[in-house]
Amino acid sequence: MNDTTFEELARTENIAETLAREMKSPVIIKSAASEDQQMALLPPGWTTKYNDDIQLRPTPRRKIAAVELNDADSFIDYIKRHGSLAYATVWCDVDYRDCKVNFLSILNDHGEDEDKPAWRDHTAKFLPEYSEEFQRWTGSDKKLMSQIEFAMFIEDNMSDITSHNGSASGVQMLDMALQFEANQDARFKSFIRLQSGGVEMAFIDKDDDATIQKMQMFDRFNIGIPVFWSGDAYRIEVRLRYRVREGRLTFWYELLRHDKALEDATKTMIQTIKEKTGVPFFFGKPF
């Protein structure tokens, strides 16, 4: 490299230093066609800064939203209003054993054309709300209860109990619960399984061992409850369990395959969403 080249480099560096020292205003180095997106050089260190004044526009450049809907009809209507068959999708993530069901629609999802990717940032979420009855029965599933707690639970939810194939009715279950409550201070003596499927329990009063009070409990009964708010009712079989310790009874119940009722109710909802929206439907997590 000759002396002339060194001199030119030195002169170029001096010019750049002079410009950096003397120029006090930012220099716009890139501006989008919309004129509300700019990249500028800022003195004195000449760092770059990106600025977006989209909030100053009368309208946004495109639709961006993350909404949550409260019912299936609103979810369907929102998809039909903002989506299209080419780009909208619906995703369903379910775990029936843990009672988890949620829907997510991506209104600007990737389409079939691989040369036209989409942003996937306009979404609508829908988490079906469980009925009050379903929440009560699943919330106390396998929960230990004293005699009084069990009697109060049966009394509060007696209307959900339905007789099926000879199983106990709500009135019978309440009578049984009240009998147990009335004899909570009695001492357990024996029990005999009856041909009817129930259990006959004999109690001897502490004050009078000659007084034997017999009570009959049904080890299985049925409930008819909706899974989702304003949804159809489903029959769920319930197994009643008990434990006797020192003359005290502890009760709990076990819902038998309530996940199947949830699965059936969810499939009905899925079919409705598919038919009324017409957009591609997937099972899984989109993100």
Image (tube, rainbow, N blue to C red):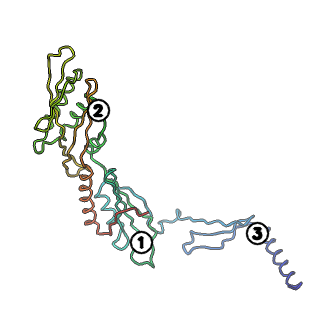
Position of residue 121 measured from the top left corner of the image (x, y, whole percent)? 45, 64
Relative to 247, residue 105 above or below: below
Mark number displayed over residue 145: 2
Residue at 17% of width from left, 28% of height from top?
Answer: 201
Residue at 81% of width from left, 71% of height from top?
Answer: 17
Left/right of residue 206 with respect to residue 96 in the rendered view: left
Mark number displayed over residue 13: none
Relative to 124, residue 185 above or below: above
Tally the marks: 3
Position of residue 6 measured from the top left corner of the image (x, y, whole percent)? 86, 81
Q: Give the SS element for disc 1.
A: loop
Q: Distance between the residues labelled 3 and 2?
A: 80 Å
Question: In this view of the protein, which residue sits in the foreground, 111 or 39?
Answer: 111
Mark whose residue sits in front, 3 or 1: 1
| Residue under label 1 | 110
- What amino acid type is highlighted by mark number 2? Met
Mark number displayed over residue 23: 3
Which residue lies most toward the top here? 207
Question: In this view of the protein, which residue sits in the foreground, 79 or 182?
Answer: 182
Q: Do the residues labelled 3 and 2 touch (CB within 8 Å)?
A: no
Left/right of residue 97 with respect to residue 210 in the rendered view: right
